[in-house]
Amino acid sequence: MPAQTALFEKTTALPLLRQDRLLHVIETYAPGATFSDDYLWGKLCAAEADAERQLRVFFGPVEIIPQGSNEDTAALDAANVRWIEEPGYDFDPDLFKGETWGLIETRQRPIIRIDSIYFAWPAPGMGNVFTVPNSWLRIDKRYGRLNLVPTQNLLMLPLNTFILSALSGGRNVPLMMQIRYAAGLQNARRDYPDLLDLVQKMAVLNLLSDLFLPQSGSISADGLSQSLSMDLDKYRQSVAERIETLRQSIHGVRHMVF
């Protein structure tokens, strides 16, 4: 397991977790219990991965590589750069018609940068039919939307659109558009400090779940008794509400049309 994630470094996160969050929890609910560094680090990493999935965003920059490309992923691994493969996007003959201006919505967001966009015909030997100049890109990074707006050689776009439409017979071509880009939160520690607090709370909740504590009970010592109650579901509900607030902050307010 790596000693650093997008949000935490093991050497600095664990002492703070023990001192600021676990000291009172252990004294109250598990007196005398001890937890190894590896166990606590595993809980913190698991909570971060869980939050990342629920928020549907990478907490750090991730390189998005077109599936089947010849890029040397071993070099990215050697540089400790996180990457994933992504299939292409379907080509629609109407992509450049009307007021669409080549509108594309990426699967991952927010966008950090776009490296390249090209149209690759699936037949062997045909290679790239058209590579989009970077100067044409108009990007809404937060929502993962981009438009292709020609800035020079206006004949180039209609000509290549005609070629693409002719090759496809005016039909959609699956996974023909290939996009190489990076996505995720560039600096989550700086921009979302509440995210770090939330992940640590999730880690503590998971630790308490492992202890299989009863919802209520009593503690007796030296003739004195003290009642003890805990409702983890209420804490989990509070965490879920904070996750939804963060999701709206990162992705915008969601709405459904019936």
Image: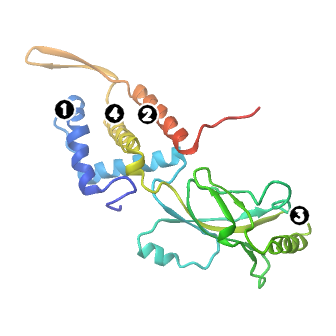
Pointer 2: what residue?
A: 239
| Residue ID at (57%, 51%) | 142
SS under mark 1: helix
C-alpha span from label 2 to label 1: 23 Å
Looking at the rendering, in which quadrant would you find the N terminus? bottom left
The relative height of residue 58 versus residue 160 in the rendered view (above or below) is above
Pointer 4: what residue?
A: 212
C-alpha span from label 4 to label 1: 16 Å
C-alpha span from label 3 to label 2: 46 Å
Looking at the rendering, in which quadrant would you find the C terminus? top right
C-alpha span from label 4 to label 3: 58 Å
| Residue ID at (41%, 43%) | 195
Q: Quadrant of residue 168?
A: bottom right
The image shows residue 141 at horizontal and vertical percentages of 59, 55
Q: Residues within 10 Å of mark 3 (few under 14, many from 20)?
A: some
Residue placed furthest toward the left: 222
SS under mark 2: helix
Q: Earlier in the sequence, mark 4 or mark 3?
A: 3
**Coloring basis for residues:** rainbow
C-alpha span from label 2 to label 4: 19 Å
User: Residue 171: which disc?
Assistant: 3
Q: Earlier in the sequence, mark 2 or mark 4?
A: 4
The image shows residue 190 at horizontal and vertical percentages of 38, 50
Q: Residues within 10 Å of mark 4 (few under 14, many from 20)?
A: few
Residue type pointed to by label 1? Glu
- Asked if disc 3 and disc 2 are in contact, CB closer than 8 Å, the reply is no
Taking 167 as reference, is 216 left or right?
A: left
Q: Nearer the viewer, mark 4 or mark 3?
A: 3
SS under mark 4: loop
Q: Nearer the viewer, mark 4 or mark 1?
A: 1
- Asked if disc 2 and disc 4 are in contact, CB closer than 8 Å, the reply is no
